Amino acid sequence: MSRRQVAALLISVGTLTLPSTVLAQKITVKAAAPPSATQGTTSLNVKITGSGFAPGAKAEFLKSGTVDPDGIKVNTTSYISNTELTANIDIADTAALALFDIKVSVAGRSGKGTDLFRVDPHEEVCTIPQSDPGHFQYVGALNSVVGGAPRYAQYLGASLAAGVAEVPLPDASTREVLVVFSGMLGSPGVAEIFFVDPVSGALLDGTTLGGGAAIQPHLTVALPYTSTQFTPYVHRMVTADLNLDGVPDAVASDNGDVMVAGLVSHLNANGTVGFAAVPFPVPSGATIGFGMSIAIGDTDGVPGLEVVVIEKGTFSRKTSVFPRAHVYRLAPGGMAFELLYSASLTVQSDDNFGNSIALGDVTGDGRPDLVGAAPIRTVGRTTEAGAVLVFSGSGALPPYRFSSTAFALVAAAPVKNERIGETVFVGNSDSDAAGQLDVIALGEPYALIGTVPVSRGLVFRGPLSAGSTERISDAFGPPSVALAKGWGTAWRGTPVADVDHNGLNDIIVPASGADITSACNGRGAVHVFLAQSDAQGRLGGWQRSPLYQPADDPSNGGFGGALAWVPESSLLIVGDPNRTLGGVGAAGQIFVYRVY
């Protein structure tokens, strides 16, 4: 045979087309669907795609790079086509958390695809723990689904205030009604007002209050925004009977859009209650920061209540603009607020003063004091230890005014980054017979004492003066950092009251981002610290009793985003502004609990 003939023969063999049945002898494994599953999954059908499959094929799942199934059992392998199989598998609770190769074998042939399947940890199901049944009873919720959509759908419960009204009825009788005010986040900027039975907690909107009264409607009141540089967000609400008609009024603020307004009540002859939005005059020069915090109380020793509105200061290397406290009173006729005076407050540039204030005579001299938070003040060499500033009432006779300078309350052993004073409030926490008011100051949720996480509140027992500090026993807090997330930052309401009726006042603090279990991250909780008595019947410390949402919302994080405690009715109102309702995210919800 010549060289030309040999070459031709080689070319002929090299271009020979083989039958498809011969090519199919090679098995390839390309993909798996689903590509992953969790430990403990049983009877899962996994679609395996590739080529060269044939009837009788068997699949194996092997931990990548090994011949070990490591917890995956193949129950059956079903032949679908020469490119598809279905493997039914069980994954043990103890299966390796790893990638797995898939090997397919048939008639002495095999092929393998690497890293095609993954085993993930168990999917933990969030089961909301039961609140202490000895102290809390869930009553109901104020938002509802109507026609497949939530009745209120813009962060309902973002801020709350509540109070009991004595409503005169047409037949000359009266009816006690709990009025619940809710701020929202979103345009156009409104307040929602609910009417609730103060004993049962039942919603009374759309019902008659009795005594021949007309139907009491739910009220949606437009707030007097003059500009909306930012999305309207009513982040503060406080309540008191400002016009002395027996019905609580409220004050709402949105410092971002420089809006502070009163929701002033009026009684109708038909036995219903209405409210009108009454704007606060904005002082000259006030901008963003006006309305950062608000409080209602007697500030001057003269009969009647005042409203204190804080305007935050601004500090830079070139300028120092100190915060101001603007003191208002509802004018005669009840349809306007008048500015009584403004006080410039001397603070340090690193204080971040003004996020939280409270009113009350904490010095014990008979004059009302202004208490405010300075959470990032450096104490000695301890950075951001935090402090509480007390601007004492001044003047020999009423009307008193707040001093422009303050004395500071700091922890006995300051802790770096604890930020004591992140939130402040005033109350008779130790239930002393004289009714002397104390200052309760909450710290930052993520502080450390050394390397140990700590979240706590401190009680500074009145009467207070410069140098006063907490006693060793006057500290309280949640048991873990996980349960402290959001600690105290969302508080709205009266936090010191005898909720369990043992003669000692208790303290209520929300933690709207608390991880209540490992599977219930960020769901939120409310910590109720129940006062415990010593052998002499005095305050001996606190025992925490947690309150949780009644049912889980997997998209939720924010139970305890706002609170309103109403001692006259024994009802605790809890806002959950991020809750999904009727398929609408962050529609918001308000829960009602009875406290024993």
Image (cartoon, rainbow, N blue to C red):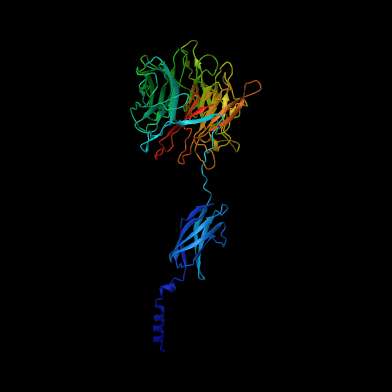
From the viewer's perspective, tell me whether residue 267 is left or right of residue 363: left
Q: Where does residue 311 sit, x and y in percent of width and height?
A: 42, 25
Please report the residue visible at 57 percent of the width from the left and 25 percent of the height from the top.
Answer: 459
Q: Residue furthest left?
A: 226
Please report the residue visible at 66 percent of the width from the left and 22 percent of the height from the top.
Answer: 535
Q: Quadrant of residue 181?
A: top left
Q: Nearer the viewer, residue 221 or 58?
A: 58
From the viewer's perspective, tell me whether residue 186 is left or right of residue 575: left
Instruction: Name the image quarter holding the N terminus.
Output: bottom left
Instruction: Name the image quarter holding the C terminus.
Output: top right
Q: Nearer the viewer, residue 501 or 187?
A: 501
Q: Where does residue 577 sit, x and y in percent of width and height?
A: 43, 34
19 over 356 or under it: above or below? below
Q: Residue furthest top?
A: 397
From the viewer's perspective, tell me whether residue 372 is left or right of residue 543: left
Question: Does the image show residue 576?
Answer: yes
Marks counted in the figure total 0
Q: Where does residue 149 sit, x and y in percent of width and height?
A: 37, 37
124 over 187 or under it: above or below? below
Question: Does the image show residue 340?
Answer: no
Q: Residue furthest bottom?
A: 1
Q: Quadrant of residue 183?
A: top left
Q: Where does residue 283 sit, x and y in percent of width and height?
A: 38, 22
Please report the residue visible at 46 percent of the width from the left and 55 percent of the height from the top.
Answer: 34
